[in-house]
Amino acid sequence: MRIWVLVVLLLLIAILVAQNTEVVAIKFLFWEANLSRVVLILLSLVVGLIVGFAGAKLPRGHKPTSTGKPGDVPPVRLPER
């Protein structure tokens, strides 16, 4: 099953490369470059993955409910009637 997923993924990447071979001009502030469109797409993917993984690793800011000691369970609050 994994081999078919890999084959389909490689086929899709080959189609992406074949359809996006033209060179495009990139301008950012005082910087200018000419890149192949597929290189720009892959570079954007890599930057997005890095930002996503870094954001997932940042602390969320919530406090833990226990001290972390074995057997330490926070009290359960029952709804009042």
Image: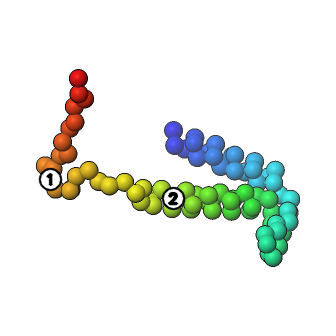
Q: Amino acid at mark 1?
A: Pro
Residue 78: quadrant of the picture = top left
Percent x, y of residue 58: 45, 61
* Element marked by disc 1: loop
In this view, the residue in front, 81 or 42, is 81
Q: How many marks?
A: 2
Residue drawn where x is 55% and y is 44% of the image: 3
Left or right of residue 74, residue 32 in this image: right
Cα distance between the residues tagged 1 and 2:
30 Å
Residue 4: image location, x then y, percent: 57, 41
Asked whether, in this view, residue 73 is left or right of residue 42, the answer is left
Give the secondary structure at mark 2.
Answer: helix
Tell me residue 49's x, y (percent): 58, 58
| Residue at point 20%, 45% (across, down) | 74
Mark 1, other Cα within 10 Å: few <14 / some 14–19 / many ≥20: few
Instruction: Give residue 45's position: percent from left, percent from top.
Output: 65, 57
Relative to 3, 11 lies left or right: right
- For disc 2, the neighbor class at 10 Å (few under 14, some 14 to 19, many from 20) is few
> At 85% from the left edge and 66% from the top edge, which residue is drawn?
25
Among numbered discs 1 and 2, the one appearing first in the sequence: 2
Residue 17, quarter of picture = bottom right
Reading the image, the residue beneath label 1 is 70
Q: Label 2 sits on what residue type?
A: Gly
Q: Nearer the viewer, residue 41 or 12?
A: 41
> Which residue does the numbered mark 2 point to in the structure image?
55
Nearest to the observer: residue 67 or residue 39: 67
Q: Residue furthest bottom?
A: 30
Looking at the rendered structure, which numbered label has been put on residue 60? none
Q: Nearer the viewer, residue 29 or 61?
A: 61
In this rendering, is residue 77 above or below 62? Answer: above
